[in-house]
Amino acid sequence: KTTTIGFAPANSTSFRDVTSSRKFKLEPESSQSAIVNGVENPGGFAPNPDGIDTGLDIHLLENTLETGPDASQATLMIVNEITDIPTSNVLLDDATLIGNSLSYGTAGGYVLVQPQAHSLDFRNAGTNNRIFKSSVEFFGLRGRAGIVIASGFVDSTAANQNGAAVSTFLVLDD
């Protein structure tokens, strides 16, 4: 089945206000997740350090999980949706690599973690310098699967129209 997702201004009152759209072919009996990413006018924002197009788009993840393979742990996927970040490695609790060479608009594979509070340390893959560090709590997620999305701007100044600072958030199937 083909589905169309449209983008419209916040004050929109009708589908006629859609400024751009994208069509997807959704497969029956499959598990997919869609993440809106990018900016409407990339020329008004800092360029991506890797030269990746940051125009408004939808990142479709295939074969996403609703439950994890281990009932005692949480199952997570890290997704980098930060437009002004270089390719990064993500460390769990400053030690365990859980996202390897994630450029803007890419996702890592699923990893198992203990269902507790953790830190996520985003480091430049080329220099190993810390870009930012975040805390995420996975309490109560035994046996569950989720997607951790890193979003916002590393440089949230005028270079990026004073946009939201980088943060991470967890998305579950419900």
Image (cartoon, rainbow, N blue to C red):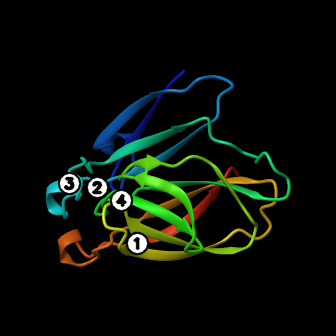
- Please give left or right for residue 82 compared with residue 63 in the image: left
> Mark 1 or mark 2, which is nearer the start of the sequence?
2
Q: Is residue 58 above or below residue 130?
A: above
Sequence-first disc among 3 and 1: 3
Instruction: Mark 1 vs mark 4: give the one in front.
Output: 1
Calculate the distance from the C-alpha at mark 4 to the C-alpha at mark 3: 18 Å
Residue annotated with mark 2: 39
Question: CB atoms at circles 4 and 3 under 8 Å apart?
Answer: no
Do callouts 3 and 1 mark residues in contact (Cβ within 8 Å)?
A: no
Q: What residue type is labelled 4?
A: Asn
Spatial CA span between label 4 and label 2: 17 Å
Callout 3: 10 Å neighbours few (<14), some, many (20+)?
few
Res 21 → quadrant? top left
The disc label shown at residue 41, or none: 3
Examine the rendered structure and indicate whether residue 66 appears above or below residue 121. above
Rounded to the nearest angstrom, the CA distance separating label 3 from label 1 is 19 Å
- Amino acid type at image mark 1: Val
**Mark 3 and mark 2: span between their CA atoms?**
6 Å
Q: Nearer the viewer, mark 4 or mark 2?
A: 2
Residue pictured at 23% horizontal, 57% vertical: 48
Q: Residue 158's spot in the image, x, y percent?
A: 19, 76
- Mark 1 is surrounded, within 10 Å at the Cα level, by few (under 14), some (14 to 19) or many (20 or more) other residues, namely many
- Seen at 31% across and 48% down, the residue is 56
Instruction: List the residue tagged with mark 1.
Output: 166
Residue type at mark 2?
Val
Label 1 vs 4, first from the N-terminus: 4
Residue 11, numbered circle: 4
Disc 3 element:
loop
Nearer-N-terminus badge (4/3):
4
Position in image of residue 109 (x %, y %): 57, 46
Asked if disc 3 and disc 2 are in contact, CB closer than 8 Å, the reply is yes
Q: How far apart are marks 2 and 1 (CA)?
A: 14 Å
